[in-house]
Amino acid sequence: MIIMERLETVLGDLGLDNAMVAVFTCLADKKKATMEEIFEHTALSRKAISMALKALESAGAVKRKGECFGIEDVRSSLMALLPSRYEQIKAEIYAYRPSSTAKACPQVEAVRNDASAVPSLAANNMDAALQSVDVISRSLAWLDDRSLNAARAAVQRGVRVRVITGIHPGLKPEARAMADAGVEVRCNEYADDPGFMITDAEVAALSIEEPPNVTEPKYFGLIIRDRDVCGKILEHIFEPTWKSAKTVEEYR
């Protein structure tokens, strides 16, 4: 009895409704049962049982064989129920925005660091994105395993990631790797001039190449947190360049 109560608690934490909890615990106890047998051992209507079984079977938590429904391994069935809840929680985390008392003027932060910090910055922006990431980058020096994985993960959760890069033969492998990860990649010679990444049309990271005569040149950038500024950069710089750029397939 105590085991079943603990199971009901776990199922409730996973977000299952009362009917699904009742059906799951019944099958966990009996291993397998027909709909009529479940009806006899629960206080549910046949309609509620049917809907609960359909949802559990769709999630892969319950297997059907003929007229019988069964749970072969409770732990595996519970794990099958986890992803949908996990993705929901993850989406809520990504959607979280703390309240801010920021002034109406744009927030600008100057960043000066070694070039080795750029891939980490790119990956962090990809991880934080909710809707879009738009990049113009000449060299793709920021692309490493972590940033590529971050781009792939962003695409998988529904973020549109677009990258415009320069027309250089040496960039083909990196461009192909991003395209294979689901990133929309295009090539345009204009990418040799600006360099920026805009996340969710509200945060822009702009890179500025330091003069060659500077001792120990470093990456210099500006982080601008302002929707109006980002919107203008997208409208006047990124979108026109994107429209006239070639796809990876067109670029030979």
Image: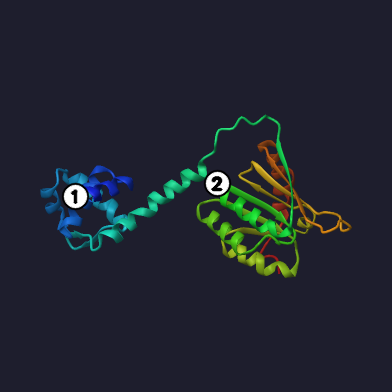
Q: Earlier in the sequence, mark 2 or mark 1?
A: 1
Where is residue 147 drawn, in percent x and y?
A: 61, 59
Q: Quadrant of residue 179?
A: bottom right
Does 68 sit above or below residue 18? below
Horizontal and vertical percent for residue 45? 16, 43
Q: Residue at x 72, y 39 (%)?
A: 108
In the picture of the structure, the residue carrying the numbered disc 1 is 2
Residue 28 lies, with reference to residue 49, above or below; the image says: below
Amino acid type at circle 1 is Ile
In-front residue for pair 118/6: 6
User: Residue 127: where, in percent of width, then height?
Assistant: 57, 52
**Does the image show residue 51?**
no
Image point (74%, 47%), residue name: 237
Q: Is residue 78 left or right of residue 97?
A: left
Residue at the disc numbered 2: 130
User: What's the residue at 70%, 60% (across, down)?
Assistant: 116
Q: How many marks?
A: 2
Residue 73 in view in this figure: yes
The amino acid beneath tag 2 is Leu
- Secondary structure at badge 2 equals loop
The C terminus, quarter of image: bottom right
Q: Position of residue 10 (x, y in %)?
A: 29, 49
Q: Residue furthest right?
A: 213
As measured in the structure, the alpha-carbon distance from the residue carrying label 2 to the one carrying label 1 is: 42 Å
Q: Looking at this view, is 53 or 205 the one in front?
A: 205
Q: Residues within 10 Å of mark 2 (few under 14, many from 20)?
A: many
**3 left or right, relative to 99:** left
**Residue drawn at x 79%, y 58% as measured from the top left:** 192
- Give the label on residue 84, or none: none
Q: In the image, 16: left or right of 223?
A: left
Marks 2 and 1 close (CB-CB < 8 Å): no
Helix, strand or loop status at disc 1: helix
